[in-house]
């Protein structure tokens, strides 16, 4: 599968390494340009490209950047992409540590709805609730007794199925977390966030989540 990644931080770099190892053709971009990613190109075989090229790279595009930078992505970024492209959002909102105040999220808009609005393309929420290194260390073959799970939320069932297959391929049981309006259940400081649970545990904690954002994850 041809996969574009926008963002080369901890999650983006981890996914580039795992996806290329799994045999996918990966194109990766960041805000500093392809030359800054030559080390990752050499290490993994992923192709360092511009943000615009990553958005048009193929069947799946993963957006994994600080939330404050989502609004700075080029306008109409996905206009030249295939209509069927599946866009995955891994972004988390950290208003006090990094992102500052984003008014729509503060007023209750789920983080992924905000990303969807800003980029002008439907998204699937995944790969955001587990630390990057844990997504390396805790991966297990399908059927393993100690296999962990990752929630996947989105409105398009076909797109969600594509992402759930990737989650499975990368060593985790995918859990259908409902539509995108339910993606708040896997945002920071919810019970499933960084909890490293199996499938039953993920389902249980998604149900236990409370929609009110915790004070430490609101803008000061």
Image: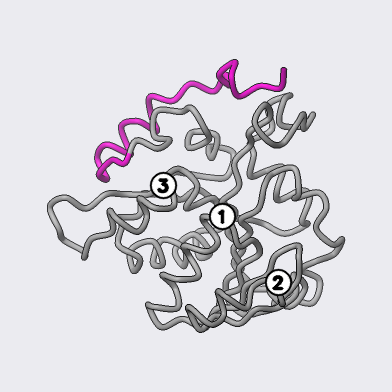
Q: Residue at x 28, y 40 (%)?
A: 197
Sequence-wise first label, 2 or 3:
2
Q: Residues within 10 Å of mark 2 (few under 14, many from 20)?
A: many
Q: Residues within 10 Å of mark 1 (few under 14, many from 20)?
A: many
Which circle, 2 or 3, is nearer the viewer? Answer: 2
Q: Quadrant of residue 63?
A: bottom right
Q: Quadrant of residue 141?
A: bottom left
Residue 57 position within the rendered picture, expressed as x and y whole percent measured from the top left: 65, 79
Picture quarter with the C terminus: top right
| Vertical arrangement, residue 177 with respect to residue 12, above or below | above
Which residue does the numbered mark 2 point to in the structure image?
55
Question: Is 85 displayed left or right of 163 in the figure?
Answer: right
- Stretch of the chain drawn in magenta: 196-220
Q: Residue at x 68, y 70 (%)?
A: 29
| Vertical arrangement, residue 80 with respect to residue 14, above or below | below
Question: Is 31 displayed left or right of 133 in the figure?
Answer: right
Viewer-closest of 144 and 95: 95
Residue 145 position within the rendered picture, expressed as x and y whole percent measured from the top left: 12, 52
Sequence-wise first label, 3 or 1:
1
Which circle, 2 or 1, is nearer the viewer? Answer: 2
Sequence-wise first label, 2 or 1:
2
**Outermost residue toward the right in this view:** 75
Disc assigned to residue 124: 1
Disc assigned to residue 151: 3
Disc assigned to residue 14: none
Mark 1: which secondary structure? strand
Mark 3: which secondary structure? strand
């Amino acid at each position: 599968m041809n996969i574009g990644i926008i963002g080369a931080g901890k999650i983006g770099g981890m996914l580039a390494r795992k996806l290329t190892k799994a045999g996918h053709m990966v194109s990766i971009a960041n805000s500093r340009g392809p030359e800054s990613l030559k080390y990752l190109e050499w290490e993994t075989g992923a192709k360092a490209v511009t943000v615009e090229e990553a958005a048009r790279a193929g069947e799946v595009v993963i957006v994994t950047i600080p939330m404050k930078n989502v609004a700075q992505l080029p306008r109409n970024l996905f206009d030249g992409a295939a209509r069927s492209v599946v866009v995955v959002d891994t972004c988390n909102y950290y208003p006090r540590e990094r992102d500052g105040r984003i008014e729509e999220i503060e007023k209750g808009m789920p983080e992924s709805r905000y990303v969807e609005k800003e980029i002008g393309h439907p998204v699937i929420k995944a790969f955001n609730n587990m630390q990057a290194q844990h997504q390396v260390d805790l991966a297990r073959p399908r059927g393993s007794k100690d296999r962990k799970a990752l929630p996947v939320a989105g409105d398009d069932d076909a797109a969600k199925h594509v992402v759930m297959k990737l989650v499975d391929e990368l060593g985790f049981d995918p859990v259908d977390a409902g539509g995108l309006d339910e993606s708040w259940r896997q945002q920071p400081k919810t019970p499933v966030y960084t909890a490293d649970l199996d499938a039953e545990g993920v389902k249980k904690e998604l149900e236990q989540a409370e929609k009110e954002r915790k004070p430490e994850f609101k803008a000061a």
